[in-house]
Image (spheres, helix red, strand yellow):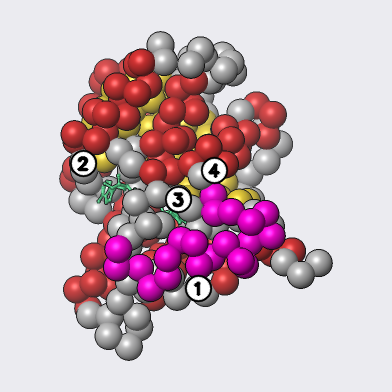
Amino acid sequence: MALESQRLAGDVAVVTGAASGLNRGIALKLARNGATVACADINDAEARKTVELIHAEGAEAFAVHMNVGDSTDVKRAFKEIWDRTGKITILINGAALIKFSPIETCTDEEWDQVVRVDLTGCFYTLREVYPYMRDSGGGRIVQISSSSAKSGSSFGGPHYTASKGGVISLSKYAARRWVKDNIRVTTICPGISNTPLGNHPDAPRRLEDFVKDIPMGRVAEPEDIAGVVLFLVSDESGYVTGITVDINGGREVYGN
Ligand SMILES: NC(=O)c1ccc[n+]([C@@H]2O[C@H](COP(=O)([O-])OP(=O)(O)OC[C@H]3O[C@@H](n4cnc5c(N)ncnc54)[C@H](O)[C@@H]3O)[C@@H](O)[C@H]2O)c1
């Protein structure tokens, strides 16, 4: 596929969780529109596969090992990206871990594991990216929450749903604090999506069970999510910060 546009030419984007699913789709989209993409994940082999997919399209990317739940590793990885590019202007916080244990049986350990990756991981990456983005003249950050943060869905466990709620608040905080630095921060809430996480064998519901509740009659594909992210990191959304965007096939308007 030829590049779609050069609207992100000169941008350096860090995508966490880029080895799979929605984040792989987002990494491809940003690269197809001119950004150089740092594909950050704990799964190095699959992150390299994302890079290969991007290179096959004639676009720019490289893989970086980053465990978002480990502050030392996050610090090292951002320095590695900065040393290589001298610029970081986009961050997509998409890495996530899901466990399906319901609140009644969720262990302390499961709670801590999920919150560490899904919420604390966003804090670590925001804290580390800030000086680099400020010194790059500003940037755009998109954090990936979930429709479950708003609906209270018990698809994921309480740790997942509460972490995703925290992500929305963290985005609003950062949006207010860094508007002076020309950094815009937004959040997306995807509905159920066709990815390894959405299709997880331990999930309490199968993907196809959700379709009857979705007015558009299908679950989300990575491309549905990536297009909205492209808008949120583009100049076309230059007067937008702090907002949360639902991407769910119209679930909010069901029955209208
Ligand atoms: N799939 C859905 O139905 C759905 C719905 C709403 C929101 N989301 C959110 O979208 C994002 C992407 O989800 P997905 O469905 O593509 O999931 P996925 O499981 O396909 O991908 C998640 C990626 O995160 C990586 N990851 C996990 N722990 C990590 C860590 N500690 N450090 C770095 N990387 C780590 C994994 O290796 C994987 O590559 C997540 O934030 C998820 O919560 C997904």
Which label lies toward us, 4 or 3?
3
Task: Please give the range of residues in magenta.
Answer: 201-220
Sequence order check: which comes first, mark 1 or mark 3? 1
Does residue 121 sit above or below 251 in this rendering?
A: above
Q: Secondary structure at mark 1?
A: loop
| Residue 74 visible to an observer of this rendering | yes
Q: Main secondary structure of the magenta part?
A: loop
> What is the quadrant of residue 252 in the picture?
bottom right
Dot 2: few (<14), some (14–19), or many (≥20) neighbours within 10 Å?
some
User: Does the Cβ of the disc 2 residue fall within 8 Å of ligand 1?
Assistant: yes
Q: First in sequence: mark 1 or mark 4?
A: 1
Any magenta on residue 51?
no
Mark 4 C-beta to ligand 1 under 8 Å: yes
Q: Nearer the viewer, residue 229 or 3?
A: 3
Mark 3: amino acid: Asn
Residue at which label 2 appears: 43
Q: Mark 1 = which residue?
A: 153
**Crowding near pointer 3: few (<14 within 10 Å), some, many (20+)?**
some
Of the residues shown, which amino acid type is indicated by label 4?
Answer: Ile
Residue 51 % position (x, y)? 31, 24
* Image location (x, y in percent) of residue 193: 48, 53
Q: Nearer the viewer, mark 2 or mark 3?
A: 3
Does the magenta segment cover residue 203? Answer: yes
What kind of element bears circle 2?
A: loop
Q: CA distance from mark 1 to mark 3?
A: 17 Å
